Amino acid sequence: MTSPTRARITSMAIRLVLLAVALTAPSWARAQSCTAEIGQRESQQLVERCLEVSPATRPPCNVSNACSLIESEIVRGCRIVAEDAPRWCADYGQ
């Protein structure tokens, strides 16, 4: 294979890799903040509930995270505190 042909193949391979990255990146990069999803007041309430039940030392209880992440931590926390769970844990199936 000649050097110019090899260079074209390498260039094309690099472009394909960059295209693949560009096409897959939006799926994980588009996660919105909870505030953007449901507004400041509601997202702050989720964060407060999350902090109340989460046993984590660095919980994902932050309005900048996706609401689904905060809610999953609430569900986990409600399961852990079980009998001592706040009444509102019932809203999360606990």
Image (spheres, rainbow, N blue to C red):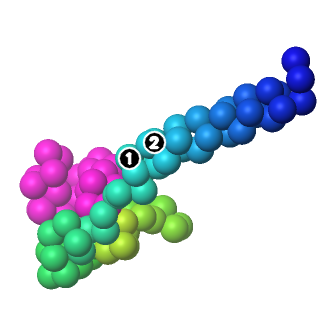
> In the image, is residue 69 part of the stretch drawn in magenta?
yes
For residue 24, which numbered disc appears in the image?
A: 2
Q: Position of residue 69 (x, y in %)?
A: 34, 56
Q: Position of residue 48 (x, y in %)?
A: 27, 76
Q: Are marks 2 and 1 in contact (CB under 8 Å)?
A: yes
> In the image, is residue 73 part of the stretch drawn in magenta?
yes
Element under label 2? helix
- The Cα atoms of the two marked residues, 2 and 1, are separated by 6 Å
For residue 27, which numbered disc appears in the image?
A: 1
Q: Is residue 88 left or right of residue 58?
A: left
For residue 2, which numbered disc appears in the image?
A: none
Q: Position of residue 14 (x, y in %)?
A: 68, 39
Q: Is residue 61 left or right of residue 47?
A: right
Q: Is residue 24 left or right of residue 67?
A: right
Tell me what residue is drawn at x 44 percent, y 43 percent: 23
Q: Position of residue 83 (x, y in %)?
A: 23, 52
Q: Residue furthest bottom?
A: 41
The count of marks equals 2
Q: Is residue 7 above or below residue 92?
A: above
Corner quadrant of residue 8 = top right
Q: Amino acid at mark 1?
A: Ser
Q: Is residue 53 visible?
A: no
Q: Main secondary structure of the magenta part?
A: helix
Q: Amino acid at mark 2?
A: Thr
Q: Is residue 15 visible?
A: yes
Image quadrant in which the N terminus is located: top right
Q: Which residues are magenta?
A: 66-94
Q: Is residue 29 left or right of residue 39?
A: right
Element under label 1? helix
Q: Is residue 14 above or below residue 80?
A: above
Density class for disc 2 (Cα within 10 Å; few <14, some 14-19, many ≥20) is few
Density class for disc 1 (Cα within 10 Å; few <14, some 14-19, many ≥20) is few
